[in-house]
Image (tube, rainbow, N blue to C red):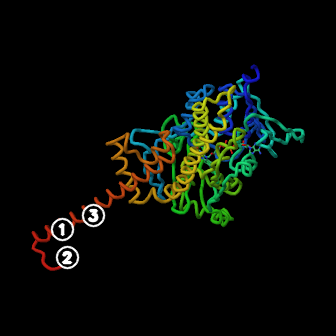
Amino acid sequence: PRAALQAKTVAIVGAGLVGGLAALYFAEAGWNVHVYEMRTDIRTEKYSRERSINLALSERGLSALRGARGVDLRALMALAVPMQGRMIHARDGTQVSQPYGVFGECINSVDRRMLNEVLLDAANALPNVQMHFQHELRSASLDAGQCTFLDRTTNDSVTVQADLVVGADGAHSAIRRELMRPARMDYAQQYIDSVYLELTIPPAPKESPQAIEPGSQFVLDPHHLHIWPRKTYMMIALPNPDGSFTCTVFAPAPMLDAIQTPAALFDLFERDFGDAVALIGRDRLEREFFNNPRGPLITVKCGPYHLSDKAVIIGDAAHAMVPFYGQGMNCGFEDVRVLFEHFQRHGVSATDARQLGAALAEYSTARHTDATAMCDLALANYTEMRASVISTKYLACRWIERVLHLVAPRTIVPLYTLVSFTNVPYSECMSRGRALRKTSETILKVVSAVSLVGGLVGTAWVAKRAGVRGPMV
Ligand code: FAD
C-alpha cells in the first residue's frame, strides 16, 4: 500500500554539530527531516562566542563525517590544522614535544563555527530537509511523537508531530528532561571545580620576524596542542588557520574569581605563563581575562537514551563530558554513525520502521556503556594534562608503551591512540588502556629494581677493587 511506502518524518531538536550531522544522515537515508533550533541560524550570525572557538577533530569524528556523502571532507580538512603532539611549556619557557602517536598520527584543530556551517549547508542542500530556526522546544509528549516549540519570531506556540524525535539539544537538553519520566531514565550530573576561559594569541603580522618560520604568521609551532601544566590548573592553546591560537585557561573558579585587578592578573600570568603573556600582549590579556565569559564544565551520565520507537537523545544531550580528551563532539558524531549501524542491522529504513524500537534499544544499551566510559576517561585526562605530563613515572610508562606499540602495533596500543586514532569502542579502549598501563608500570618497577641491584653490585665491585672496607653508606 502507498501509505506504507511513505517516508517517515524525524524531528531533530538542536542544530549544533551533532544535530547537523544527524540531519544529514537521516536526509541521505531518505527520511523527511525537520530540524528545530532555538537560536538564529549560525550562518547568518555576525559573531557568536559560545563554547570553544576551535575543537580537536580526531578519527571517530572523521569516520562519521566520511559516512555523510554531502560533506566535502577534503575541503574541510584543507581548513584544519593538524597537531601531531603536545608541546609542554615549562615556567621558564622551555618547550618539550610529546608526539601523540609513533607513526605520525595527528588530531586536527578545526573552527567550530565553520564545521557547523558546513554541516548545515550540506543538510540544507537536500530537498527533504527543512530547518526551523528560533524554535525553542518547550514541552513534548514523546510517546505520542509530539513536540511543542516557542517560535521566537512570533511568540506563537507551535506543536508538531513526528514518527521519531531526536534530541541533539546539548548538555542541558529539554528533550532529555521530557524523556526522563516515560523512559524511567537514570540520571547523574557533576560539575567539576574548574571553569574555562578563552584568550587569544594573535597572528604575527605578515613577514614579521616574530613568526616561527618565513611565510607563516604562527608565533608558536602550529602542529602541536600547547599545554602549560601547572598541577592544579593549566592553559592550553590550539592553532587556527589564520595564524592565531585560541588559549583556554582551566582553573578552579575561586582562583580566577580572586583575581580582581590587573596587577594580580599579571603577577599570576607572568609567573606561570610568562612566554604566553608575551605573545598574547598585556592589553589583550587584561581585556579578555576580565571580559570573556567563564564556562562551567559538566559531566552528564544518563540512560536509557531512548523511548520505545519514538525518541532518542544523542551528543551532549546524552553524555556531556569535560573537554580534556577532545572527544565530546567526536563521540557525538560517532553516536550518529553507530545509530545508523543499528538501523542497518535491524533493517530500519525511511519507509520501514518496524524494527525501530529494537534498533533504538540495542543502540541505547551499547552506546551507554561506551559513552559512560568516555566520560570517565575525559575526567581522568584532566589530571594527566595538568599534572602527569610532567611526572617522571608517567613519562617513563608512556615511553615503555610507545616502544611496545612500535614492536606490536596491532596488539599493543596505548590508550590515547585507541581513543583518538581508532574506532575501537570506548569501553574496550578503557580496559585495554588500563591493562597496558599496569604492564608498563610493572616493567618500570622491574627495570628500576634491576638497575638498583645492578648499581649496588657495581658499586660494591668498584669499592672492592679500590680496597674500600667497612659499611658503605
Ligand atoms: P551543542 O553543541 O550544545 O548543540 C546543541 C544545540 O541545541 C545548540 O545549537 C542549542 O542552541 C540547541 N538547543 C538547546 N536547547 C534547545 C531547545 N530547547 N530547543 C531547540 N534547540 C535547542 N569536543 C571535541 O570533540 N573536541 C574538542 O576539542 C572539544 N573541545 C571543547 C572545548 C570546550 C571548552 C568545551 C566546552 C567543549 C569542547 N568539546 C570538544 C565538546 C563539544 O563542544 C561538544 O561535545 C559538542 O558541541 C556537542 O555537540 P551537540 O550538538 O551535542 O550539542
Which residue is disc 3 drawn over? 449
Which one is earlier in the sequence, the residue at label 1 or at label 3? 3
- For the C terminus, which image quadrant? bottom left
Amino acid carrying mark 2 in the image: Met
Does the image show residue 276? yes
Circle 1 — which element?
Answer: helix
The Cα–Cα distance between marks 2 and 1, rounded to whole angstroms, is 9 Å
Q: Quadrant of residue 168?
A: top right
Amino acid carrying mark 3 in the image: Ala
Which one is earlier in the sequence, the residue at label 3 or at label 2? 3
Q: Nearer the viewer, residue 238 or 304?
A: 304
> Measuring 86% from the left and 38% from the top, which residue is drawn there?
158
Q: Nearer the viewer, residue 161 or 447?
A: 161
Q: Quadrant of residue 333?
A: top right
Residue lying at the far bottom of the rendered structure: 470
> Measuring 39% from the left and 51% from the top, which residue is drawn there?
436
Q: Quadrant of residue 448?
A: bottom left
Which residue is disc 1 drawn over? 459
Residue 443 position in % (x across, y down): 31, 56
Residue 120 position in % (x across, y down): 69, 32
Which residue is disc 2 drawn over? 472
The Cα–Cα distance between marks 3 and 2, rounded to whole angstroms, is 19 Å
Q: Nearer the viewer, residue 41 or 407?
A: 407
Does the image show residue 245? no
Circle 3 — which element?
Answer: helix
Residue 202 position in % (x across, y down): 60, 45
> Measuring 80% from the left and 35% from the top, which residue is drawn there?
161
Q: Is residue 362 above or below residue 321?
A: above
Circle 2 — which element?
Answer: loop
Q: Nearer the viewer, mark 1 or mark 3?
A: 3
